Amino acid sequence: MDQVDLAGPLDPVLGRELGHAGAVAAAAALRAGIPFDLPVHIRDGAVTLPGLGVLRLGGRDGWARVSSAGEGGFVLWPPGQGLPVGATATTQGATTQGATRQGAAGPGEQGHWIPLRVLEAGNGRHRFRLTVDDLDPNRDCQVLAVAARLDRRTVQRWSALLVRGWPLVVAHDPAQAAAMGAGLSTLVPLDDRGRSRYASATCSDALGAVAATTPHDPTDLAVTLVHEFAHFKLGALLDLVELHDGSADAVHYAPWRADPRPVGGLLQGAYAFLAVAGFWRSRALASTGAPAAQAAFEFAWCREAVRRALAGLRSSGRLTRLGERFTAGMTARLDQWAGVPVPPAVRRWAIVMNDDVQIIWRLRHRRPDPAQVAAWASAWQRGAPWDPGVIPATPAASGASARVHAGPRAVPRCAIPTTEARTSRHPRQALVRAHLADPRLVGSGRLPVPEGLPGLTPGALTRADVLLIAGNHEAAAQGYAARLAAGMPGVPDLAAFAGLAVARRLASATGPGFRPGPETAAFVEHPEVLYGLTRWFRDRTGRLPDVDALAAWVGGDPRARRGYRDGRLAEHPAGTGGRLH
């Protein structure tokens, strides 16, 4: 870098990159306690030493030199004839049980060295320290918007959350906690503004760093640390071996995402949620009462979600032999957990809420050809048996969202955003969690449910949702059917159709495996077929067909065609209440 003519013309982008490299080298030398003399770049009137802090200078940008000066000290020589500026950086800081004492917080800090603050929890082998990086201009590698410099109150909140959340991680797996303490070093706060849900992310180009919005509670923080550390470990492994072929086609279903995922993203998510399942297993076994039921639900939901993701990975044809061995190990872990006791009602909710999000995903991303739907409608009207024809197995991989990642290491190299490491992405899931905590909340089956439940936005729930969680499945089905009947032609209501499917699933499934009967299996196995037919009749006739009869017909129920050979539709006019026949 010394051979570059810093006084001559230099591409601005290249200059910033070279200056950043110098700052990284200077920070490393400070940590190692070795002498240095390096060029750095002043950006926005400041010089950043990554992982340590920022020296605010003011004035114009340009090149400067930074040199070591005694233990932990450095001197910065600004461009031109300016006087050198000295400061002392420390990799430790004077900490309390939380945030550092040194350095004021706030956007007005100018003309001095501003150290990064440090959060601390635990002690001994399980001492855990996180440097809060809310200053480095390059900290936004996770794609998500980063927060500005935190005020003291927010830092204190983070500190309190860590002090209470870290012991949960240690209690879950002391060995993993020790590894986490050595592997995770930095917290990058994300911008909370305009967010209704908690979010976190990791990036393998910033190993050891976790980006996150402010957690709701200590448990959320503990789950985030477990989740993101799993990403961290898998990202490191993918630097050494290839577990998949690097396909960038975003066509795979991931229960924790609304968008189709490339194989690498699905693998990352499955591994991270396997770790989260283990955390909730520990919490369920260590808790009693409502907290135990909630933890059991989270465990059972994650266990079922990872099972479905692993099935997608195995059938993808994209795994290498090492990838097959790796996912076989994950499957073995799930098999070990098959005997973990989960209350039957909680297990039922875990399965059904997995069905709920998968049905919505399939309705959004698997759309049968309109000609095929018309052929099915004709067969139904003639009383002919259902012929599957061509049902799309995967969504089309097109557009920017399908090509964000490329190469076998692309997912960990790029951002891995994780919205809601818990399972409350969908309003009905959030309501199930609240119901398990306090059954009286929805016992009456009436709105309004109190606002402020994690994962819920105002107006997200309908009365049918509340009836569903309260156990009144028939009334819930009628409510969802009314929404479908009253809907605008051509305007989909995916949540209402999925709610109808879940209501029918809950009403018909029996036995320890909680398998749907033949009259309702199509709601889960072929929801895009039923939805396509429902919309076909609704948009052309203004009337809703007998969705139950359609489901029995598509599901191959031998009783399904009785009474329909004359082409009669058991239907009701749009907007008249939407009763199911």
Image: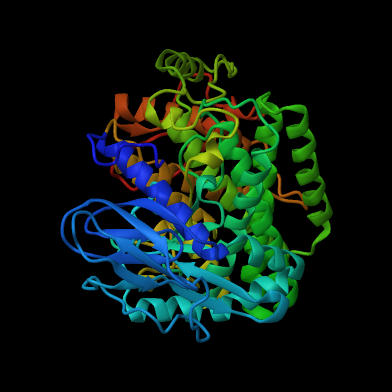
Give the total of numbered labels.
0
Q: Is residue 262 above or below residue 471?
A: above
Q: Is residue 76 above or below residue 313?
A: below
Q: Residue furthest bottom?
A: 96
Is 409 left, or right, of 322 in this rendering? left
Q: Nearer the viewer, residue 75 or 266?
A: 75
Residue 120, position as x, y percentages in the image: 55, 78
Residue depicted at 56% across the width and 15% down the height: 384
Is 218 left, or right, of 105 in this rendering? right
Q: Is residue 94 above or below residue 226?
A: below
Among the 4 quarters of the image, the one containing residue 490: top left
Residue depicted at 82% across the width and 46% down the height: 332
Q: Is residue 412 above or below residue 336?
A: above
Q: Nearer the viewer, residue 230 or 14?
A: 14
Question: Is residue 235 visible in the rendered structure shown here?
Answer: yes
Q: Residue furthest left?
A: 59
Q: Nearer the viewer, residue 537 or 316?
A: 316
* Colouring rule applied to residues: rainbow
Q: Residue furthest front?
A: 81
Among the 4 quarters of the image, the one containing residue 270: top right
Residue 393, position as x, y percentages in the image: 57, 23
Residue 175, position as x, y percentages in the image: 76, 66
Residue depicted at 59% across the width and 16% down the height: 387
Question: Is residue 451 visible in the rendered structure shown here?
Answer: no
Residue 430, position as x, y percentages in the image: 48, 62
Q: Nearer the viewer, residue 469 or 237?
A: 237
